[in-house]
Amino acid sequence: MDDALQSSEHLQIVYSEVCLLRMLKHENITKLYTSWVDDKKKTINTITELFTLGSLRQYRKKHKNVELMAIKNWARQILQGLQYLHNHNPPIIHRDLKCDNMFVSLMEIMEKLKLEI
């Protein structure tokens, strides 16, 4: 991160990515509300929507037996998000797709409970 804040070229790339992230509007893509650079701490800070259940990896560690239907639903949501990114002009590539970078919301679990009632 220090390199990105030292070089104006790297900082411009970071700003471009943040601006792009702020423009993305899709139900399966994390919403970025705001961001700022802390020059003293040499950090880039962001505020995103809250995911109370953590990452998909954390959720799977706590819940070993997840129904196949839930897994299919997660896969569908991931693919819908990727399709949105890839259909963007120009196309956006995620570059770091893994369970640590996917988040589970309480709303998703509550929707599932509503369907079961």
Image: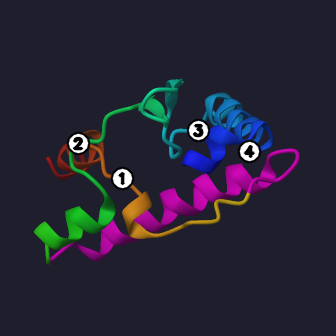
With 71 as the anchor, is 53 left or right in this view? left
Look at mark 3 in the image and give the residue it sits on. 26
Separation of residues labelled 3 and 2 (CA atoms):
18 Å
The vertical placement of 106 against 65, above or below, is: above
Separation of residues labelled 4 and 3 (CA atoms):
27 Å
Please state which of residues 17 and 108 is positioned toward the viewer in this rendering. Answer: 17
Three-letter residue code for mark 3 = His
Secondary structure at numbered mark 3: loop
Q: Earlier in the sequence, mark 1 or mark 3?
A: 3
Look at mark 1 in the image and give the residue it sits on. 103
For the residues carrying marks 2 and 1, which lies nearer the camera in this image? 1
The vertical placement of 47 against 59, above or below, is: above
Bounds of the magenta span?
Answer: 65-92
Percent coordinates x, y for residue 68 in the rendering:
30, 76
Look at mark 4 in the image and give the residue it sits on. 10
10 Å neighbourhood of mark 3: few (<14), some, or many (≥20)?
A: few
Percent coordinates x, y for residue 96 in the rendering:
56, 66
Percent coordinates x, y for residue 108 in the rendering:
30, 46
Three-letter residue code for mark 2 = Leu
Report the residue at 22% width, 64% height from top: 58
Q: Earlier in the sequence, mark 1 or mark 4?
A: 4
Separation of residues labelled 1 and 3 (CA atoms):
14 Å
Three-letter residue code for mark 4 = His
Report the residue at 63% width, 49% height from top: 3
For the residues carrying marks 4 and 3, which lies nearer the camera in this image? 4
Q: Are marks 4 and 3 in contact (CB under 8 Å)?
A: no
Look at mark 2 in the image and give the residue it sits on. 106
Q: Is residue 114 magenta?
A: no
10 Å neighbourhood of mark 2: few (<14), some, or many (≥20)?
A: few
Residue 107: image quadrant is top left
For the residues carrying marks 1 and 4, which lies nearer the camera in this image? 4
